[in-house]
């Protein structure tokens, strides 16, 4: 990752802290996920900060220490539905389609990263 880290003009304090965590994980030659687990950091909170660093071009989008491992999620293929009341898509490519509007609490949890 060190070859792909570029210092931008401005980073938030949280982004600077995340960048330091990423550097420490790289030095230890472990994935960021494993680093967070070992340091008792909540990965879901730091994931969004890491994504902001990717969007800003500070780091690459792929954690090299993770190798070619996948997230553990299995691909899901759903038969087309006649109507979709709600469609949520993420810049990384995942899409969630619901036949009815989801509960506000569920949607808030999803967007805040609280739902695993």
Image: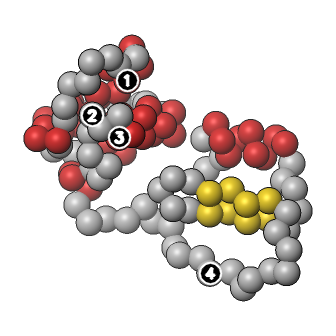
**In whole angstroms, how far apart are the C-alphas of marks 4 and 1?**
35 Å
**In whole angstroms, how far apart are the C-alphas of marks 3 and 2?**
6 Å
Residue 84: x and y in percent read 82, 69
Residue that appears at 71% across and 41% down: 109
- Determine whether 113 is above or below 92 in the image: above
Mark 4 vs mark 3: which is more N-terminal?
Answer: 3
Is residue 17 in sight in this rendering?
Answer: no
Residue located beneath label 3 in the image: 54
- Determine whether 84 is above or below 91 in the image: below
**In whole angstroms, how far apart are the C-alphas of marks 2 and 4?**
34 Å
Residue 53's image quarter?
Answer: top left
| Kind of element beneath mark 4 | loop
Disc 1 to disc 3: CB gap under 8 Å: no
Mark 4 vs mark 1: which is more N-terminal?
Answer: 1
Disc 4 to disc 3: CB gap under 8 Å: no
Residue located beneath label 1 in the image: 15
93 or 23: nearer the viewer: 93
Mark 2 vs mark 1: which is more N-terminal?
Answer: 1
Disc 2 to disc 1: CB gap under 8 Å: yes
Residue located beneath label 4 in the image: 77
Residue located beneath label 2 in the image: 58
Disc 4 to disc 1: CB gap under 8 Å: no
| Kind of element beneath mark 2 | loop
Number of the label disc, if any, that sits on residue 49: none
Disc 3 to disc 2: CB gap under 8 Å: yes
Is residue 61 in sight in this rendering?
Answer: yes
Left or right: 113 as drawn, with respect to 20: right
């Amino acid at each position: 990752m060190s070859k792909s880290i570029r210092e931008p003009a401005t980073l938030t304090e949280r982004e600077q802290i995340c960048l330091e965590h990423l550097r420490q994980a790289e030095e230890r030659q472990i994935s960021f996920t494993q680093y967070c687990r070992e340091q008792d950091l909540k990965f879901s909170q730091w994931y969004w900060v890491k994504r902001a660093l990717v969007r800003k071009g500070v780091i690459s989008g792929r954690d090299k220490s993770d190798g070619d491992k996948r997230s553990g999620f299995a691909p899901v293929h759903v038969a087309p539905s006649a109507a979709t009341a709600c469609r949520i898509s993420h810049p990384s490519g995942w899409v969630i389609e619901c036949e009815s509007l989801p509960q506000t609490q569920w949607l808030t949890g999803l967007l805040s990263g609280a739902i695993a």
